[in-house]
Amino acid sequence: MVKRAIPSREELFEILQSVKDPEVPVLSVVELGIIRDVVASDAGVVVTITPTYSGCPAMHAIELEIRRALAAEALGPVEIRTTYSPAWTTDWMTAEAREKLEAYGIAPPGRAESSELIPLRRRAATIRCPYCKSHNTEQKSVFGSTACKSIWFCNECRQPFEEFKAI
C-alpha cells in the first residue's frame, strides 16, 4: 500500500473550499474566514475554526462537512479545534465572498468598526441594493433570517433584501 503524501496547508485550504456555509451556500467556510488554520501530519489533520458568533447554529453542520471533505481525500483522523479569540469579524471575509454575496442578493458587509466603542446613531446608514445598486434603501428590521443579517428595502427597484451585518 502506498502511503499518501502529507498535503500542504495550501492544499488543505483548497480541499476545504468545497465546504459551504449552510446558511449562505454560495460561500465556502474558507471565503468566510471561519477556517483559521489547518495542519496535516502522519497523525491526522487538525483544523482550527472560529465561529461567526458563539451561538451559531450552523457550526455543527460545518464541522460534519469539514470531516466529510477531508475523509473524501483519505485524510484523517480529523480533530477540530474551536477558538473564540480573536473573535471572528466580517473583515476576514475575502473580496470574492463579498462579490458572491451581492450576486446572491445579499448586501455584503462594510468594514467592521475599528474602535473599541460602539458609536450611537439615530438610524443605520443606507447601503447599496444588491439588485439595482441604488443607495435609496432603508432598513426595515435589524433582525433578519439569521442573527448575522438584517432586512432592508430598496425604494428604487422595490425589492426587499438582506444585509450581512458587519461584525
Image (cartoon, grey):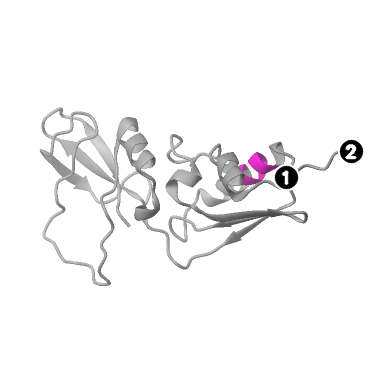
In this rendering, position of residue 15 left or right of residue 87: right
Disc 2 element: loop
* Callout 2 touching callout 1 (CB < 8 Å): no
Quadrant occupied by the C terminus: bottom left
| Residue 36 in the image, given as x and y percentages of width and height | 51, 56
Which callout, 2 or 1, points at the residue further toward the start of the chain? 2
Q: Amino acid at mark 2?
A: Met
In this rendering, position of residue 133 left or right of residue 16: left
Q: Can you identify the residue that label 1 sits on?
A: 75
| Residue 81 in the image, given as x and y percentages of width and height | 61, 61
Q: Which residues are magenta?
A: 65-70
| Residue 116 in the image, given as x and y percentages of width and height | 27, 72
Q: Amino acid at mark 1?
A: Leu
Nearer to the camera, 98 or 10: 10
Q: Quick one: label 2, few (<14), some, or many (20+) residues within 10 Å?
A: few
Disc 1 element: loop
Q: Which mark is residue 152?
A: none
CA gap, disc 2 and disc 1: 15 Å
| Residue shown at 49% from the left, 45% from the top | 29
- The mark closer to the camera, 2 or 1, is 2
Q: Is residue 83 magenta?
A: no
Quadrant in the rendering for residue 153: top left
Q: Can you identify the residue that label 2 sits on?
A: 1
Quadrant occupied by the N terminus: top right
Q: Is residue 66 magenta?
A: yes
